[in-house]
């Protein structure tokens, strides 16, 4: 895949050329590599902290559950690493996609599908919920 890089200055011609190049690059990607991009600005809907992750937990375990129009979750891992899956199978402490302590996950999609579990005792997860129009 070829990519074009242009330094943006104040001219409309350069901005137009950049947009045309970006559209051409995106159009050349195979369908399976296209990713949904949230529309900004995001609408903040709420926060929760999960501290009981000794067995697989869904985001619906948050006090108040998942906000009704939420389609994005920003998940931050505090003290211990976790694993997550969103394919309908619960993760275990050794199977699933790992996120180390201090790591984050910006998840766009079906929030009810995410399941989290701690890799070690005392994992804490912070979740911010957003809506992207």
Image (cartoon, grey):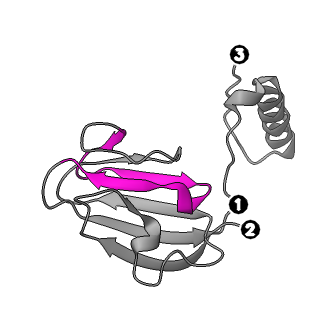
Q: Is residue 108 magenta?
A: yes
Tally of numbered discs: 3
Q: Which region of the structure is painted magenta?
A: 96-119
Residue found at the far bottom of this picture: 64
Q: Is residue 2 above or below residue 113?
A: above
The Cα atoms of the two marked residues, 1 and 2, are separated by 6 Å
Q: Is residue 20 above or below residue 41?
A: above
In this figure, which residue is indicated by the disc labeled 1?
39
Q: Quadrant of the C terminus?
A: bottom right
Residue 5 drawn at (x, y percent): 67, 27
Secondary structure of the residue carrying numbered label 2: loop
Q: Residues within 10 Å of mark 3 (few under 14, many from 20)?
A: few
Q: What residue appears at the point 23 percent right and 64 percent down from the top-left corner?
A: 124
Q: Are marks 1 and 2 in contact (CB under 8 Å)?
A: yes
Question: Looking at the image, which is closer to me, 108 or 3?
Answer: 108
Point out which mark residue 112 bears: none
Nearer the camera: disc 2 or disc 3: 2
């Amino acid at each position: 895949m070829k990519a074009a890089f242009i330094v943006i200055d104040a001219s409309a011609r350069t901005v137009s050329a950049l947009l045309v190049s970006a559209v051409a690059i995106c159009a050349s990607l195979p369908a399976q590599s296209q990713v949904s991009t949230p529309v900004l600005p995001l609408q903040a809907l709420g926060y929760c902290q999960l501290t009981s992750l000794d067995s697989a937990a869904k985001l619906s375990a948050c006090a108040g559950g998942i906000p009704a129009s939420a389609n994005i979750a920003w998940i931050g891992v505090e003290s211990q690493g976790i694993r997550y899956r969103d394919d309908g199978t619960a993760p275990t402490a050794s199977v699933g996609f790992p996120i180390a302590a201090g790591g984050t996950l910006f998840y766009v999609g079906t929030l009810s599908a995410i399941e989290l579990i701690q890799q070690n005792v005392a994992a804490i997860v912070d979740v911010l919920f957003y809506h992207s129009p």
